[in-house]
Image (cartoon, helix red, strand yellow):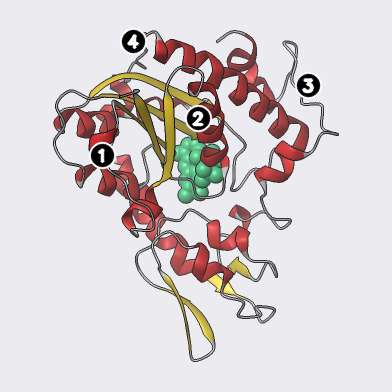
Amino acid sequence: MPETTAIVYFSGTGNTEAVAGFIENSIKRYFNVEAFKIEDITKRKVDFDFKKFHMIGIGYPIYGFNAPRIVFDFIEHLPVSKMINAFVFSTCAGPLYFNDIASYKVKRLLESKGFNVFYERQFYMPANIALKYNDEVSKQLCNAAADKSKIMAEEISNKLVRSRRDKIGPMLISWLYAIEKRAWKMIPKDFLVLETCTKCKKCIQACPLDNISLSQNKISFGDNCLACYRCVYSCPARAITAKKYKFAIFKDGYDIKQIINNDNLKGNFITEKTRGYYKIFRNYLFKE
Ligand SMILES: Cc1cc2nc3c(=O)[nH]c(=O)nc-3n(C[C@H](O)[C@H](O)[C@H](O)COP(=O)(O)O)c2cc1C
C-alpha cells in the first residue's frame, strides 16, 4: 500500500490553513497526503481513520505562546500509536522570545501517545490581532511560507531530524501561561455585537466549537471559546466588536486568502537592510 501522510490542523483565521495547503502540495511530491481540519474530525464531518497513515503532521496557530486547546483535546483522543512518525508546524506573528516553547507541550503529549516527533517548523505569518502588518509584508510572509514548505517536504521525505530548542528561561516562567489563559477567557466575554448584525448566522457556522447561538433574536457567546477570532472576521457586517479590547480587532477585517490571491502585491517589502519593526523578519526571510 502506498504511504499516506495525514496533515491535521486547526486554523482560526486562515493562516495555518494556508500553510497546511502549502505543505500538502509540497509533500504530494513524495507521499500521498490527506489534509483534515481538526474541527471537521471532532464534529464528525469527515472520517479520520488514523490507522491508514504512516505519518501525521499537526499544525496550529500559536496562542499565548502555546497551542490552542482544541489541538490538545484532539491529540488526547488519539489512540496510542506505535512510534508513528509525526511532525509539528505552527504559525505565529513573528520571532517572539516566548514562541520558542510553543510546541513543547504538544510534542510531549504526542510523545506520551507513542509518536516519534522528528520534525518541527514555525512559520511567521501576519498577525491576525492587534498589530496589522502591511499587505506587502503579509504577502512576503506567505511567499516565504510557500518556499519553506517545499524545503520542509523534502527534509521530511529524507527523514531529517529538525527540532527546535525549547528554551529553559521561558519554560521556567511558564506560570505566565496561567495569566494568558485567563486573558483568553476574558476576550470572548468582551465581544460586543453591534446593531448592524443581520442575524445571518455566519458567525454561528464559523465557530469551531459551536459556542455561538442565536436566541431571542440575539447573538450570544458561550463559555467554550478559543479566542480564534474567526467569528469576528467572518462577519460580513463587521458587527462583532469589543467593549474593552477594541485594539485587538482589525477594523477592515482579516482575509489572508485575499492577500495570497492578490497578484498585484510583489511581496518584496522587507530587505536585508530593513529597519524598524519589520526588521524582526530579516533572519527568517534571508538566513534561515
Ligand atoms: C488569541 C490569540 C493569541 C495569539 N498569541 C500569539 C502569540 O503568543 N505569539 C505569536 O507570535 N502570535 C500570536 N497570535 C497571532 C497568531 O498566532 C498568528 O497570526 C497565526 O498565524 C494565526 O493563525 P490562524 O489564521 O491559522 O488562526 C495570536 C493570535 C490570537 C488570535
Q: In this view, does 166 lie above or below 89?
A: above
Give the number of the disc on residue 268.
3
* Labels 2 and 1: the sequence-earlier one: 2
* Labels 2 and 4: the sequence-earlier one: 2
> Separation of disc 1 and disc 4 at Cα?
23 Å
Give the number of the disc on residue 50.
1
- Amino acid type at circle 2 is Glu
Give the number of the disc on residue 95.
none
Q: Residues within 10 Å of mark 4 (few under 14, many from 20)?
A: few
> Separation of disc 2 and disc 1 at Cα?
17 Å
- Amino acid type at circle 1 is Phe
SS for tag 1?
helix
Instruction: Decide which of 182, 215 is in the foreground and name it.
Output: 215
SS for tag 3?
loop
> Separation of disc 2 and disc 4 at Cα?
19 Å
Q: In which quarter of the image is residue 244?
A: bottom right
**Residue at figure coordinates x 17%, y 23% from the top left:** 83
Q: Quadrant of residue 90?
A: top left
